[in-house]
Image (cartoon, rainbow, N blue to C red):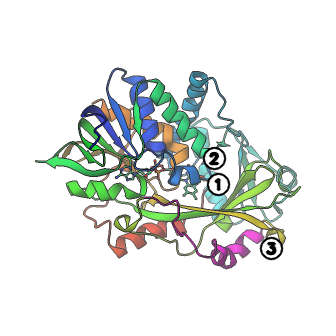
């Protein structure tokens, strides 16, 4: 058996965007320590590379906002470090409200934007249509544009974190599966991997949809479940300008953004598909998320979108994309320390926002791993907030899937 390293200060399980971001911040802020990221497949190849990668800042969940702002700062720093552009698209985000309830939500969002000093402007329906010619905005009661928000290539952002982390001394091992946590008497002391045993001062579980499979070895149930996200990309057309804004349509439970002259869009299904973490294959590259590329979901939910996108039914669909994100019943992340288990930290339950919050998650976990308190308020993300749960039970999985079905934002 080939053992790459027998002792490390920090072992991070999972080379998705969370694992890579933690390695980046830890090696940047606490140089000279041995940091290993262990990824059983290829880095950033599970949920991360599949994301629509809306980097939303202003949200109703205020606890996410400082984390997302950190991501934007990290991008600037990493671009400088690597001497390359991430080519983040500063398209801005348009929110369109077409009912009293959604106008109320939008008003709350504007108060939040003011609190976090995020700029916005009101748009007329004509202006909204001229920015997004595919959009029928005349039923809107209020339209607001947040110019400071972007989308990006999520694989590129994940690999920016990993490349900077490597430059700063992290080792990122691919094809290295963590089989077991070394756990005794209430503490984790390392991991057993497909390439040998590695002792560690701190182990961080950043294993995405699979995180519960490992954490349950310590009796820690992470309150989340793997729930499918899916989106579609249309064929190219003149009504989809390359530099148009991202658009949120909460009345349709839909979002859209430009994709190189086409439109990438998602619309929430009434019953989101979920899977038990212990039943997921180790590699989801060939996982059958939908045998009809989500077409029956589109048929069921498309009318809601067509209300704002009248060419929906006569526009060809070119691509389908799906993946598993970790959803929680309250739409909050799960991260931080695990009560009763020493030397073990979690970065999980991304609720479909992991690209946006990756910088903050990376910084927070690096701070905790170094023994410092986090600069962020992590109280909403506490692992024990739902009490005792069975993360593999059908009732729990359904409860988490419901939180995605009800989601109004992007
Ligand atoms: C279709 C879709 C659209 C999305 N859209 C957005 C969006 O618009 N904006 C946004 O912010 N987010 C979005 N997301 C969510 C985002 O992709 C995730 O939040 C983010 O990628 C989570 O990163 P992660 O590192 O936790 O998980 P992952 O990227 O899944 O990484 C986890 C890694 O852990 C590895 N692993 C698991 N177990 C082990 C083990 N035992 N040993 C070694 N390695 C292991 C896996 O192989 C995997 O590579 C979307 C997700 C999907 C699927």
* In contact (CB < 8 Å): disc 1 and disc 2: yes
Q: Residue at x 67, y 75 (%)?
A: 295
Question: Disc 1 and disc 3: Cα gap in Å?
Answer: 28 Å
Contact (CB < 8 A) between labels 3 and 2?
A: no
Query: Sequence order check: which comes first, mark 1 or mark 3?
Result: 1
* In this picture, residue 306 sits left or right of residue 294: right
Q: Give the mark toward the camera: 3 or 2.
A: 3
Q: Which of 228 and 334 is in front in this view?
A: 228
Location of residue 11 in the rendering, given as x and y in whole percent from the top left corner: 31, 38
Decide whether residue 307 is among the magenta residues: yes
Q: Please give the residue where the numbered disc 1 appears in the rendered image.
A: 106
Q: Residue at x 32, y 65 (%)?
A: 391
- Image coords of residue 28 (percent x, y): 43, 24
Question: Does the numbered disc 2 mark a residue whose Cβ is under 8 Å from ligand 1?
Answer: no
Of 198 and 322, the residue lying toward us: 198
Reading the image, the residue beneath label 2 is 110
Residue at 31% across, 59% down: 213
How far is disc 1 from disc 2 in space, using C-alphas? 6 Å
What is the secondary structure assignment of the residue under circle 3?
helix
Q: Residues within 10 Å of mark 3 (few under 14, many from 20)?
A: few
Examine the structure image and report whether residue 333 is included in the region drawn in magenta: no
Residue furthest to the top in view is 32
* Crowd tier of the residue under label 1, counting other residues whose Cα lies within 10 Å: few below 14, some 14–19, many 20 or above: many
Q: How crowded is mark 2: few (under 14 residues within 10 Å), some or many (20 or more)?
A: many
Which residue is the site of mark 3? 313
> Separation of disc 3 and disc 2 at Cα?
33 Å
> Which span is picked out in magenta?
283-308
């Amino acid at each position: 058996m080939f053992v790459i390293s027998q002792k490390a200060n920090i072992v991070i399980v999972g080379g998705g965007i969370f694992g890579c971001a933690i390695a980046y911040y830890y090696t940047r802020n606490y140089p000279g320590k041995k940091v290993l990221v262990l990824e059983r497949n290829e880095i950033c190849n599970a949920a991360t590379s599949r994301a629509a990668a809306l980097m939303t800042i202003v949200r109703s969940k205020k606890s996410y906002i400082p984390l997302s702002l950190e991501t934007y700062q990290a991008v600037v720093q990493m671009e400088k470090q690597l001497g390359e552009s991430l080519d983040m698209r500063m398209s801005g985000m348009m929110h369109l409200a077409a009912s009293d309830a959604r106008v109320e939500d939008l008003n709350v969002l504007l108060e939040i934007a003011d609190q976090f000093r995020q700029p916005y402007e009101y748009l007329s329906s004509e202006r909204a249509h001229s920015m997004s010619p595919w959009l029928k905005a005349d039923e809107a009661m209020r339209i607001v544009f947040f110019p400071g928000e972007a989308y990006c290539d999520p694989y590129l952002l994940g690999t920016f974190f990993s490349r900077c982390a490597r430059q700063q001394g992290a080792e990122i091992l691919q094809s290295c599966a963590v089989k077991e946590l070394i756990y005794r008497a209430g503490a984790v002391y390392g991991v057993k991997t497909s390439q040998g045993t590695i002792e560690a001062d701190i182990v961080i579980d950043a294993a995405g949809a699979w995180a519960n499979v490992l954490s349950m070895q310590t009796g820690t149930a992470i309150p989340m479940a793997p729930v499918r996200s899916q989106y579609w990309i249309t064929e190219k057309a003149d009504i989809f300008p390359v530099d148009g804004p991202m658009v949120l349509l909460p009345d349709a439970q839909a979002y859209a953004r430009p994709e190189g002259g086409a439109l990438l869009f998602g619309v929430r299904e009434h019953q989101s598909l979920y899977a038990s973490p212990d039943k997921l294959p180790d590699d989801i590259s060939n996982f059958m998320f939908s045998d009809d590329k989500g077409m029956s979901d589109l048929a069921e939910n498309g009318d809601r979108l067509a209300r704002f996108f009248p060419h929906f039914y006569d526009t060809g669909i070119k691509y389908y994309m799906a993946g598993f994100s970790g959803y929680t019943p309250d739409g909050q992340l799960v991260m931080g320390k695990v009560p009763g288990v020493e030397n073990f930290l979690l970065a999980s339950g991304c609720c479909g926002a992991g690209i946006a919050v990756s910088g903050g998650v990376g910084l927070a976990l690096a701070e905790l791993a170094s023994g410092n308190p986090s600069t962020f308020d992590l109280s909403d993300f506490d692992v024990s907030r739902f009490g005792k749960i069975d993360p593999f039970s059908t009732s729990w999985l359904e409860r988490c899937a419901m939180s995605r079905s009800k989601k109004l934002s992007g």
